[in-house]
Image (cartoon, grey):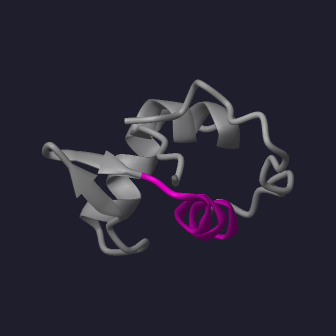
Amino acid sequence: MNDYFSTGEAARLLGVQSYRISYAHATGQVAEPLRVMGRRAYRWPDLIALSKHFNIELKPAPTGSGKEKHGRV
């Protein structure tokens, strides 16, 4: 099962304001992620793409059997 992150959660993980992510999508600077129920749903590769766009180092994806409860849409 894949974990998905909302725009707000992605913004917190990246340390940017959520409107900057929305603007990057609106202007075509970053590809749109999957949408679930009309909302953007970011997967880890989407977060990596955003981190490259904003020139931010992103920590490696969490691993292990204990799934994080936050970050699901």
Answer with left or right where residue 43 lies relative to residue 60: left
In the picture provided, is 16 more to the left or to the right than 55? Answer: left
Residue 15 visible, this angle: no
Left or right, 24 with respect to 1, comes to left
Q: Which residue lies furthest to the front in this view?
A: 65
Spot occupied by residue 70 in the image (x, y as percentages of width and height): 57, 25
Tell me the residue at 37%/74% (across/down). 31
Which residue is more in the foreground, 18 or 62?
A: 62
Q: Nearer the viewer, residue 47 or 15?
A: 47
Q: Is residue 34 visible?
A: yes
What's the magenta region? 42-53
Tally of numbered discs: 0
* Residue occupying the far top of the picture: 69
Q: Which residue is drawn at 69% across and 36% down?
A: 67
Q: Image quadrant of residue 26?
A: bottom left
Coordinates of residue 8 in the picture (x, y in percent)? 46, 31
In magenta segment, residue 16:
no
Of 49 and 42, the residue lying toward us: 42
Q: What residue sits 44% from the left and 49% below the top?
A: 21
> Which quadrant does the C terminus fall into?
top left
Q: In this view, does 55 lie above or below 5?
A: below
- x, y percent for residue 35: 24, 55
Position of residue 52 relative to residue 72, above or below, is below
Residue 53 shown left or right of residue 22 in the figure? right
Q: Kindly report the secondary structure that dominates the magenta region of the rendered protein.
A: helix
How far across and down, in percent of the image, does residue 68 sit? Answer: 67, 31
Indicate whether residue 44 is drawn in magenta.
yes
**Looking at the image, which residue is at 60% across and 38% down?**
16
